[in-house]
Image: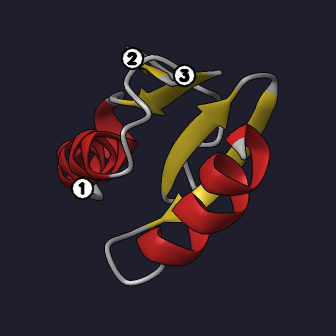
Amino acid sequence: MTVNVCVGSSCHLKGSYKIISLLTEAVKAHGLGDKVELGAAFCLGKCTDGVSVKVDDEVVCGICPENFDAFFAKYILGRVG
């Protein structure tokens, strides 16, 4: 699974680096380092929709620390088992 967090101007201002940190910690805590490849994308084209994260071929928008756990459970844990 490939997960890319947008780090373009808008997402950067909305906290993309915090989301990268949360993803890194969660992947490590769940022992998914061999199943999840984390990266960054310069722009995912959803600039008005908050921090955008591309999980394989699906773009999920509006990720923030408050909804991160639900996002991780659904889009990461729910897909890798």
Colouring: secondary structure
Q: Secondary structure at mark 1?
A: loop
Considering only vertical position in the picture, is 64 above or below 12? below
**Marks 2 and 3, how far apart in space?**
13 Å
**9 relative to 57, above or below:** below
Mark 2 or 1: in front is 2
Left of 81 or right of it: where is 19? Answer: left
Q: Earlier in the sequence, mark 2 or mark 1?
A: 1
Q: Disc 3 versus disc 1: distance between alpha carbons?
A: 25 Å
Q: Amino acid at mark 2?
A: Gly
**Residue reaching furthest to the bottom:** 66
> Tag on residue 39?
2
Relative to the observer, which residue lies in front, 49 or 76?
A: 76
User: Could you tell me the amino acid type at mark 1?
Assistant: Gly
User: Dot 3: few (<14), some (14–19), or many (≥20) neighbours within 10 Å?
Assistant: few
Find disc 1 in the rendering and name its residue: 15
Q: How many marks?
A: 3
* Element type where label 2 sits in the image: strand
Q: Position of residue 42 (x, y in %)?
A: 41, 15
Q: Position of residue 50 (x, y in %)?
A: 49, 59
Q: Residue at x 65, y 21 (%)?
A: 1
Label 3 sits on a secondary structure element that is loop
Task: Determine the residue positioned at 27% across, 51% down.
Answer: 29
Tag shown at residue 35: 3
Amino acid at pointer 3 = Lys
On the image, which quarter does residue 56 sit in?
Answer: top right
Q: Is residue 17 above or below residue 18?
A: above
Q: Quadrant of residue 46?
A: top right
Residue 59 location, x and y as percent? 73, 39
- Res. 7 visible in picture: yes
How many angstroms separate mark 2 from mark 1 (CA)? 15 Å
